[in-house]
Every structure is written in structure tokens, then in C-alpha cells.
Amino acid sequence: MTAVRLGVLALQGAFREHIAMLNRLNVEAAEVRLAAQLDDLDGLIIPGGESTSMGLVAERWGLVEPLRQWVHGGRPTWGTCAGMILLAERATGQKLGGQALIGGLDVTVNRNYFGRQVDSFEAELEVPALGEVPFHAVFIRAPAITAVAEDVETLATVAAIQNDDEAVIAAVRNGPILATAFHPELTDDPRWHRFFVQMVQDYMAHST
Ligand code: GLN
């Protein structure tokens, strides 16, 4: 296995939990707070938390433009929950006026899709990309993906009361970008982290 160096954006939210999970997989992971730190990374995770706060801190610390360059440069990036909102090209139900803060992920998200009815819930998701065993997903004031561009691969859906119990999209892959509406770092199941590490390794194998 090629050694990968991952970073987790550490402005706000659940960054420590991502690092702990990666360390369990023997993957090196750094807390990222400075633009210069991006230069040393093979892949970046933008954690869950609160997308408006994370965006404001990123603006204050001069990280928005470097993060845009990173993502739009095609570098492997995984956004969970608030991180997914920041990566989405289009967002509805948000305070910042629908403007993509980082963008790059060609989807529309509804920022608090599940929030009005239930703040948090858990669900067993079928995720063929992770194997046969369902993934126990934790949703916390979670967004949902309401529209995807043609080249975006849906990896998981979840039945939503808000959608007459029909499925809405909860995880996608768009080339080097992975996005999950839920929080895999808050579970004991490392399969999403392993999946992202594999994406990063594939990217490294093809870019050298
Ligand atoms: N809905 C929240 C937001 O707008 C995200 C919640 C989360 O990351 N758990 O930022």
C-alpha cells in the first residue's frame, strides 16, 4: 500500500474524529489550518460541522481561494455533511445566498433537508461500493443531494419522510470528489475512510 498523507480541514466541526479513524487505518493525517499545508497533502477531508461557520473562518484565514484551487485542480477531496455543502456547486436553503463557497462537486444540495423534521437520525444504507453489509449511517442536521449532473455517481440513497418515503441521494462520487451527507467518522465502521484512501492511492498512481 502506497503511503498517503491526508489532511483534515480543522477550522470547526468533527475533524478530530476523522483523524482518529484514519490513524486506526494506519494512515497519516494532519489538521489543516494554513493554505501552505495543502502543498504537502495527497488528499483532503472537509468535515461536518456548520457550513456557515466553517465558511466564515475559512474566509477570515484566507483559505477559500487555496481550497478552491485544490478542489478545482482535481485533487482528491471528501466532504462529509457541512463539508459536502461547501463542495456543492449549488445549494438551496442556505444563509450565504446559494453561492458555492468552494464548489467543484456538480450537484445541488439542500442544506438542511432533514433538519426541519428530525435533527438527527440513523439509517442502514445499502452501499454496493462498500460491499454487501449495509452501512450504519448517522445523519445530524443533514443535507441531501437533490440533483446531480450526468457524470456524478450515486453511491447511496436514504428513504426520506420529507420525500414521501422515497429515496434521496446521500452519497456521491464525482471523479476525485467524494461526498457523504452523513458522518462515517462518528461510527466504528472504517469502510468509507478506506474507500477514500483507495481513491487517493488511485489518483497518485495515475498522476505520477
Ligand atoms: N446542515 C448543517 C450545515 O448547514 C451541516 C450539519 C453537519 O455537518 N452535521 O452546515
Image (cartoon, rainbow, N blue to C red):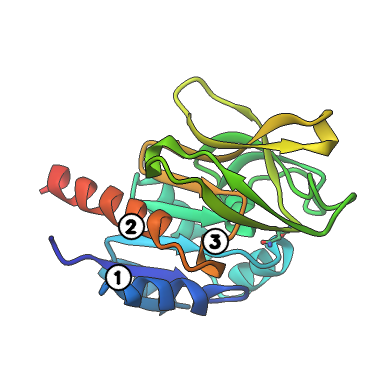
Residue at 18% from the left image edge and 51% from the top image edge: 204
The CA distance from mark 3 to mark 1 is 29 Å
Q: Quadrant of the N terminus?
A: bottom left
Residue 101: tell me if it is visible. no
Residue at 62% from the left image edge and 73% from the top image edge: 13
Is mark 2 in CB contact (under 8 Å) with mark 1?
Answer: yes
Q: Residues within 10 Å of mark 2 (few under 14, many from 20)?
A: some
Is mark 2 in CB contact (under 8 Å) with mark 3?
Answer: no
Ligand 1 within 8 Å of disc 3? The answer is no
Foreground: 186 or 109? 186
* Residue at image mark 2: 194
* Residue at image mark 3: 64
Residue at 40% from the left image edge and 62% from the top image edge: 190
The CA distance from mark 2 to mark 3 is 27 Å
Residue 120: give x, y in percent of width and height: 77, 59
Dot label at residue 25:
1
Foreground: 59 or 51? 51
Front tag of 2 and 3: 2
